Amino acid sequence: MGASISDFLLIDNSNSFTKFALSSRVKLGPSRKLRTSEVTEASLKKTLRGWRWKTAVLSSVVPEKGEVMARFLGDGGARVVHVNARANLGVGVKYPKPKTIGADRLANAAAAFAAFGGPVVVVDFGTAVSFDIISGAGDYVGGVIAPGLEAMTDYLHQRTALLPKISLLEPPSAIGKSTKHAMLAGAVYGYRGLVRQILKEIGKELGIPLNLPVVATGGYATLIAAGLPEIKTVQDNLTLEGLRIIGNLNG
């Protein structure tokens, strides 16, 4: 796929990492990743070497880096589809200030609705954890934003003298037998409680107190979803799939 011309170059520019993938109109292809802090025209040239595409689909939540990529892509002569509330997303947007919705959240909404219909809730476990709600009529109607799991544990390490930085994984039990074990239990079990309660409240407002369709994505989706039956499915490439769908809908 890398040697031929792909239909799309998909770019998910998030706070921590920027993901790139080639794609046909129907299927994702090879992907590459770059730390967002390291995004420059030089690093883009190196990362994308050997790839050819007809149209770039750009989702950015880091304006400074988004501008760098837009300039790089424009200089290369490729057509660029910018993901925002004005684009054809395959879902409507019923939200007071559409311009304030993150592009990645719109891409997730497009992918979730295309795959599961509505209503559906997307939980994206990124630097922040975001909940995005698509109604039964197929409209993006709002969301919830909470601190990300890693941000919470890093804060404890940074603001206390004796608490270590930990790698997040399933705790062996709820009662900690060491400082690290206790932090794991607090982080993972506590975070599941946060997610469960937010989903419960969303379900009540939608009038779906039971069996609310929920799809999760992002770095810690698999870990947290393992103890949450409320999450029906985990889809690692949801945002990229959404960008593929938006690329198709916008020429």
Image (tube, grey):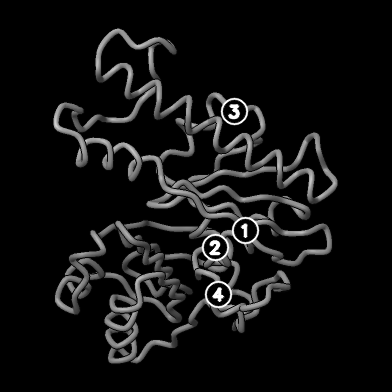
Residue type marked 2: Arg
Front disc: 1 or 2: 1
Dots 1, 2 in contact, CB < 8 A: yes
Label 1 CA crowd tier, 10 Å (few <14, some 14–19, many 20+): some
Residues at marks 1 and 3, CA–CA distance in whole angstroms: 19 Å
Dots 3, 2 in contact, CB < 8 A: no
In the image shown, does 32 or 215 lie closer to the viewer? Answer: 215
Q: Quadrant of residue 153?
A: top left
In the image shown, does 112 or 134 lie closer to the viewer? Answer: 134
Labelled disc at residue 228: 3
Residue type marked 4: Gly
Residue sitting at x 83%, y 63%? 137
Residue sitting at x 15%, y 26%? 162
Labelled disc at residue 247: 4
Horizontally, residue 97 falls left or right of residue 6, namely right
Lower position in the chain sequence, tag 3 or tag 4: 3
Reading the image, the residue beneath label 1 is: 143
Residues at marks 3 and 2, CA–CA distance in whole angstroms: 22 Å
Residues at marks 2 and 4, CA–CA distance in whole angstroms: 15 Å
Front disc: 3 or 4: 3
Residues at marks 4 and 1, CA–CA distance in whole angstroms: 24 Å
Lower position in the chain sequence, tag 1 or tag 2: 2
- Mark 3 residue element: loop
Label 3 CA crowd tier, 10 Å (few <14, some 14–19, many 20+): some
Residue type marked 1: Gly
Labelled disc at residue 105: 2
Lower position in the chain sequence, tag 3 or tag 2: 2
Above or below, 37 relative to 198: below
Labelled disc at residue 93: none
Q: Quadrant of residue 163?
A: top left
Residues at marks 3 and 4, CA–CA distance in whole angstroms: 33 Å
- Mark 1 residue element: strand
